[in-house]
Amino acid sequence: MNLINIQNILKTIKSSRKMTIYFSLIIISVLFLIFFNIIDNGENKESNTNNEINTESDYISNIESDLTKIISKIEGAGDTIVMVTSEGTSKYEYAKEEHNIKSADKNELEEKYIYGENDSPVTISIENPKITGVLVVCEGGDNSAVKEKIYKAVSTSLNIRTNQIYVTQKNKKENFR
C-alpha cells in the first residue's frame, strides 16, 4: 500500500462517526491485548524461575522448621535451632510423548515434552537433594540422655546415620534468633 491509499482510508474513517468509533475500539483492543500479553508472559517466566530456585531452599527450610518443632518438644531439649546440609540439587522428571518414526532405512524415537498451564512442562516427579548432615543446637544439648533422644529422632525422621548428626548445647549468653 502506498501513502495515498492510507490517506484515503483515514479520510473514509474520519468522515463516518461509526467508523471512527469502530476503528478506535479495534485499536484500543489490540493495544490492550498486546499490553496484557507482555505483562502475563513476564510474570509467568519470573514465577517459573523463582519456583525452581526456591524449591530446594524451601525443601531444606521446611525440614529445618519441622525438626526444630519436633526436637523442642523432646523433654529437656528446650529452645532449639536446626541447620540441615544437603548435597546436589533437585532433579525434575517431565512428562514426555514418544513417537516411533519409521523411515526406509532406520527407526527413530522422537520425544516431545508435554506442556501444561503457563507453557511450562508437566512435572512427573521431583527428586529432592540428599540430606548430608544435621546440626542441632539446643539448651539441653549437654545432657547425654537428651542427645540420644535427639539423635534417634533426627536419624529416624530423615533416614540418615547418627554420625551425620551433631548435637551441642546452646550458648546461654547469646540469642541466635
Image (cartoon, rainbow, N blue to C red):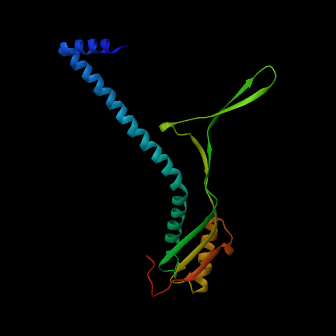
Q: Position of residue 60 (x, y in %)?
A: 55, 62
Q: Residue at x 23, y 13 (%)?
A: 11
User: Residue 86's x, y, as percent?
Assistant: 62, 64
Q: Is residue 134 above or below residue 34?
A: below
Locate residue 124, reporting x and y percent: 60, 43
* Relative horizontal placement of residue 39, taking residue 142 as reference (left or right): left
Question: Which residue sits at x=46%, y=47%?
Answer: 47
- The answer to which image quadrant residue 59 occupies is bottom right
Of the pair 95 and 74, the residue shown nearer to us? 95
Q: Quadrant of the C terminus?
A: bottom left
Furthest toward the front, the residue is 3
Which residue is drawn at the image coordinates 38% and 40% (left, top)?
39
Q: Quadrant of residue 88?
A: bottom right
Quarter holding the N terminus is top left
Give the total number of marks visible in the rendering. Answer: 0
Which of 16 and 128 lies nearest the eye of the viewer? 16
Left or right of 22? Residue 176 is right
Q: Is residue 159 above or below residue 105?
A: below
